[in-house]
Amino acid sequence: NAGVTQTPKFQVLKTGQSMTLQCAQDMNHEYMSWYRQDPGMGLRLIHYSVGAGITDQGEVPNGYNVSRSTTEDFPLRLLSAAPSQTSVYFCASSPWRGPYNEQFFGPGTRLTVL
Amino acid sequence: AQSVSQHNHHVILSEAASLELGCNYSYGGTVNLFWYVQYPGQHLQLLLKYFSGDPLVKGIKGFEAEFIKSKFSFNLRKPSVQWSDTAEYFCAVNAAGGGADGLTFGKGTHLIIQP
């Protein structure tokens, strides 16, 4: 199993540009989520999905969209990039949520918005 | 909603020293507790987890943590650290039986081990 994969690893955008961060998992996990990691802030949840066709907002959803058309993929869209979105983005997946929802993290995407 | 507090943002130790990283959470119900580690340039990996049972849990690489319900704490310990333990450590909590909104993470502790 490849586990959780993310592309690209690095990205530089100009303010106002849009882009999609890709996330895929091959473990047949129902639950997937996106976090951003900023220095001194830990990880904060952006959006999550408990299954194909179902998504919901986390702690910091503004400026981001998600969709979940398949179990495997959970892309994160930046609609109009802003410097405040400069961060490291992690995708994670977990078996169907319950009391044992250890999450498996991808390698991250480092995004810089100029 | 739950919250997590990690007491130390930066810790510097010498090799062979003992380690204890503090973690406190706030939530009125039953929780699942985790410690994740992020080595330089890498993604998060699970060190250990507590769901129920023995409050002293052992994880990988000689780490252990003790859940003290009365203190809402889940401190991470290691009796003798190594240079390779240099990393960022995150405590996380999820409400047991629910919590579709994922894990709530603490802000992290940056641990530096000096040779």
Image (cartoon, helix red, strand yellow):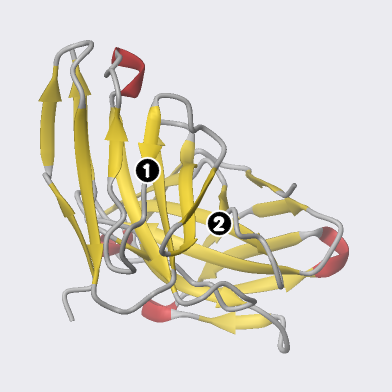
Q: Nearer the viewer, mark 2 or mark 1?
A: 1
Instruction: Reply above or below: A30 against A60.
Output: below
Residue at (24%, 55%) from the top-left corner? A23
* Quadrant in the picture for residue A57: top right
Tell me the SS state at disc 2: loop
In the depicted view, which residue is nearer to us: A86 or B9? Answer: A86
Which quarter of the figure has residue B31? bottom right
Q: CA distance from mark 2 to mark 1?
A: 16 Å
Q: Chain of mark 1?
A: A
Report whether A49 appears left or right of A81.
right
User: Where, by quadrant of the figure, is residue A106 drawn?
Assistant: bottom left
- Inspect the image, locate mark 1, and give the three-letter code of the amino acid beneath it: Val
Label 2 lies in what chain?
B
Q: Secondary structure at mark 1?
A: strand
Residue at (20, 24) in percent of width and height = A18
Circle 2: residue type: Gly
Looking at the picture, how far across and down is residue A110, in whole percent? 20, 37
Q: Nearer the viewer, residue A83 or B71?
A: A83
Quarter of the picture containing the C terminus of chain A is top left
- Give me the residue at 23% from left, 62% from top: A24
Can you tell which mark lies on residue A74?
none
Q: Position of residue A60 (x, y in %)?
A: 51, 32
Which residue matches tag 2?
A: B102
Residue in the image at 44% along x and 71% along y: A30
Up the image or down, B50 lies above or below A17; here it is: below
- Determine which of the numbered discs, if any, sits on residue A66 in the image: 1
